[in-house]
Amino acid sequence: MSSAGAGGKKEETAMLRLFTVKAYRNYIIVWAALLVLTFITWRVSFIPLGLLNVTVAMIIASLKASLVALFFMHLRYENKLVWAFALFPLGFLSLIIFGTLVDVFYRG
Amino acid sequence: MMQETAFEQPASRGYLAEKGFRSWALTLDHKRIGVMYLCTTLLFFLVGGMLGLLIRLKLMYPGEQLLSNHAYNVIFTLHGAMMIFLFIIPGIPAGLGNFFIPLLIGARDVAFPRLNILSYWVFVSGILVILGTLVSPMDTGWTFYTPYSATTGAAVTALSFGLFLVGMASILTGLNFVVTIHKLRAPGMSWNRLPLFIWGMYATSIINVLATPVIGITFLLLACERLFGVAFFDPTKGGDPLLFQHFFWFYSHPVVYVMILPAMGVISEIIPVFSRKPIFGYWAIAYSSLAIAFIGFLVWGHHMFVSGMSTVAGVIFSFLTFFVAIPTGVKVFNWIATMYKGSISLDSPMLYALTFIFLFIIGGLTGPFLGALGTDVRLHDTYFLVAHFHYTMMGGTVMGLFAGLHYWFPKMTGRMLNEKLAKIAWFFIFIGFNVTFFTMFILGMEGMPRRWAQYPPRLQPLHIVSTVGSWILAVGVAVMFANFIRNIFKGDPAPANPWRGLTLEWRTPSPPDTENFEEIPVIKDWPYGYGKKTGAKND
Amino acid sequence: MTEEHPQHGESPEAVFETAKLGLWTFLATEILLFGGLFTSYIVYRLRYPDLFHAQYQYLNRTLGLVNTVILITSSLTMALAIAAIRRGRQWVSRLCLVLTIMFALGFLGVKYVEWTEDFSRGLYPGTNMFFSLYFMMTGLHGLHVVAGICVLSAVLVMSCRGRFSEQYATPVEISGLYWHFVDLVWIYLFPLLYLVG
C-alpha cells in the first residue's frame, strides 16, 4: 500500500486509495494561475467601471476560490458526499443574505 | 413487562462500572458523556423551573409586589436564557443523542470521541462564564435585542462570550453526529433501516452546524460593539438594530426545530413499540424531519413582523411560515395511524408520548395565529405567544424528553422506574401544565403583554389560576425526579429489553458495556417490524 | 501508528475519510460564521456607497496585495507539504510546513503594520461603518490565521517526531484543508475591502 515512490512527478488519481497524490507541478501551476488572477483583479480595480468593478472583482475572486477549492483542497477528486458538504452551506449563506436584503431593500 | 428475580444489583454495571472522578471527567465513552450532559441540563431545567415558579408567584400580584421591576426583568431573562441555552437546546441531542446514536446505528462510539468530551467541557466553561455574569445580571430578555443590550450596564459582553462557548459546544456535537451517522453505521444499516430517532437527530445536527455559527457571530458583534464601538447595530453610526434581529432569528428560529426534532424522533421510537405495530409511513416521517429542518431556515422574519421590518419581507416570511405545518402534520397523522388498531400499552413512556402529541398539536395550531401578519400584530409579545412557545417547547420537547427518559431509563441505569410513581407524576404534570399555560392563551387575548412586571388588576384572576397551575406542575416534576433519583439506586434490575423493542440498543445488556456490542451486528431488518411474523422489511 | 481510532477497527482510509468529512463540516460552520460579516458588508455597502468609496482609500492597497500573494503562496507550500508526505518525503514536507508557518507569520506582520498605521491616523473600529467592517472582518480572519499557526506548529512537531508516513498523514491533510479555507476567505476579503470601494 505504498505511494508513488520515487517517481515524484508521476500523476496518480485517488482510485485505489482515499487520498489524492498529485505531482508538485500541478500545485505550482495552480499557484501561478492564482497570482495571474490576482494581478488582473489588481489592475482592473484601477479602471473606473462603476458597478462593473464589483462584478468583475467578485467573478475573479470566485475563480480564484474555485481553483483553491478544486485543486488545493482536492475537491476535484472527492466524492459526491464531500461536494455536498462543501456546497450546501453556500446555499444557506445565500439565504441569509437574500432574506436580510429583502427586508433592507424594501424598508420605508 | 418482564422483571428479574430478587437481585439487589443488576448483573453487571457495564459502562458504569469504572469509578472515580477522572474516569468520568476524561471519559471518551459517549454513554458517559451523554449522562453528564443529561445531569447538567436537567439541573438547569430545575433551576430554570424554580425561576419560572418565582415569576408566576410574582405575577399573582398586579403591582410591584414581591420583586422590583428591575429584579423581575432579571428573573425572566435568566429563566429564558437558562432554559433555552442551558437546558432545551443541548437537552435531548447532547444527552439522549450522545447516549443512543451510536447504539442505534450499531457503532462503538461517535466519530470523534475526543471532540465529544471537549464539547462537554466547552459547554461547562460557557456555563461558568454565564454564571459569573450573575454579579451584574442581564435584564434584556433572553433575546438581548440591541440597542439596549449594547448599551446597558449589565455584564453583556461576558455573557456573549459565555453563550459563544455554549454555542460552540452545540456545533461540535452537531458536527460529531453528522459524521457519525454518515460514516459509522453498522454493516447492513442502510438509510432505509435507520431508526427514526436517528433521522431526527441527523436533521437536528445539520441545523446545529449551519445555524449556530450565525448566533456566534452575532454575540461576537454585540461584544465588539460594547468593547470597541463597532457600528453594526448602532443607529448613531449608521448601524441597524434590525440587523441584530435578523442574525439573531436566523439562528433562533431553526433552533426551535433543534429542540423539537429530537423529541419527535423519540416519539417515533416509542409509539410503534407501545402499539406493537410498525410505524406508519416511515419515509414520510424520515423526510419530514429534513423538510422541517429546511423550511425552518426560511421563516425567521416571522419573529420580526412588528419590528419595523419591511412589509414585503413580512408578507414573504408569513407565507413561508405556513409551510412548516405540512411536514409537522405528516408526522402527527402518521403517529396516529400507527396507533390505529394497534395493541396499546399505557406505560409511562407511552403516556408521555401521547401527551406530547396532544400538547404539541395545541402549540402547533396556535402557531399560524402568530404566523399570520394580521393577527400577529394583535398577538405579538402577548401571553398568547408565551403560551404558544411553552406548549411547543414544554408540551412538546420537554414531554418528549420525559418520554425518552422513561423509555430509556432501564437501558441507561440498568434499573426500572416505579411505574405507579411515574403515573402519579404524569398526572400532576399534565394537569398542572395545562392549567398554567392554557390560561395564558386567554390572558394574551385579553391583552396581557409579555415581560411586563405589572398589569391591569382586571387580569389578576387569570394570573392566579396560572400560578396555582404552576404549583401543581411543580409537584409533578418533583415526584418525577424523586422517582428517577430513588430508582437509580434502588430500582428493580432491568432486563435487556423490558419494552420488547426492535432497535439495536435493546440487544445490549442494561446497562450496556463500554464497547456497546461484543461484535458489531450485521443488520438485516427494518427496526419496526412489530406484530409481523418475519419482522419484515419496508420498501 | 497508522490508525487514529483503534476502537473502530476500520481501515486507515476509512478513518481518514471520516476525519476529512469532519473537517468539511467544520468549514461549513466557518462559512456561516464569516457569512454574518459578509451579509453585513453587503447591507451597509448598499446603504452607504459614498462612505465606502471615501473610506476604502485610506487602506493600504499595496500591503493588501502583498498579503494576498503571501497567503496564496502559503497555500501552495501547504499543498506541497501534503503532496510530499504522501510520497514519504519527510524533510520536504517539514520544510514546506515551516514555510507555510513563516508566510502566515509574515501575513500577521503585514497586518500589524497596516493596523498600527490606521490607528495612528485615528482610524479605529468605532470610527465609522466601513472601518467597523474592515476591522471586524480582517480581525476575525486574523484570529483564524493565529489559530492556523498554532495548529500547523503542532502538526510540524508531530511530523518532526516521525508520526506521519505515506499511509498516515491525516492531521497534515485536514489542517491543510483548514489553511486553504483561511486563504479562501482572504481571497474574498481583499477585493471587497481594498479594491472596490
Image (cartoon, rainbow, N blue to C red):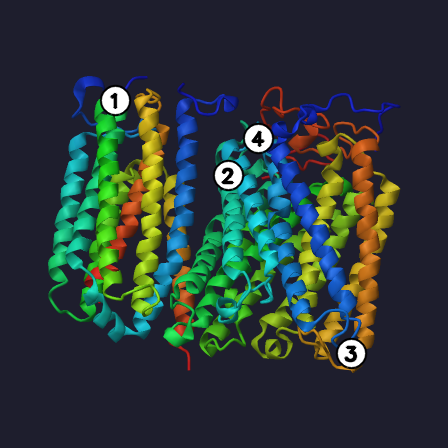
Residue B409 falls in which quadrant of the image? top right
Residue positioned 46% across, 51% down in the render: B210
Q: Position of residue B147 (x, y in %)?
A: 49, 71
Is C58 rendered above or below residue B422? below
Residue positioned 45% across, 53% down in the render: B213
Residue at mark 1: C90
Type of amino acid at the residue the image marks with label 3: Leu
Residue at mark 2: B176
Judging from the image, mark 3 belongs to the subunit labelled B
The mark nearer the N terminus, 3 or 2, is 2
Do circles 2 and 4 both sit on a common chain? yes
Residue at mark 4: B26
Q: CA distance from mark 4 to mark 3?
A: 53 Å
- Per the image, label 3 sits on a secondary structure element best described as helix
Type of amino acid at the residue the image marks with label 4: Leu
Residue B120 falls in which quadrant of the image? top right
Q: Left or right: A44 with respect to B312?
A: left
Do circles 1 and 2 both sit on a common chain? no
Is C187 rendered above or below residue C126? above
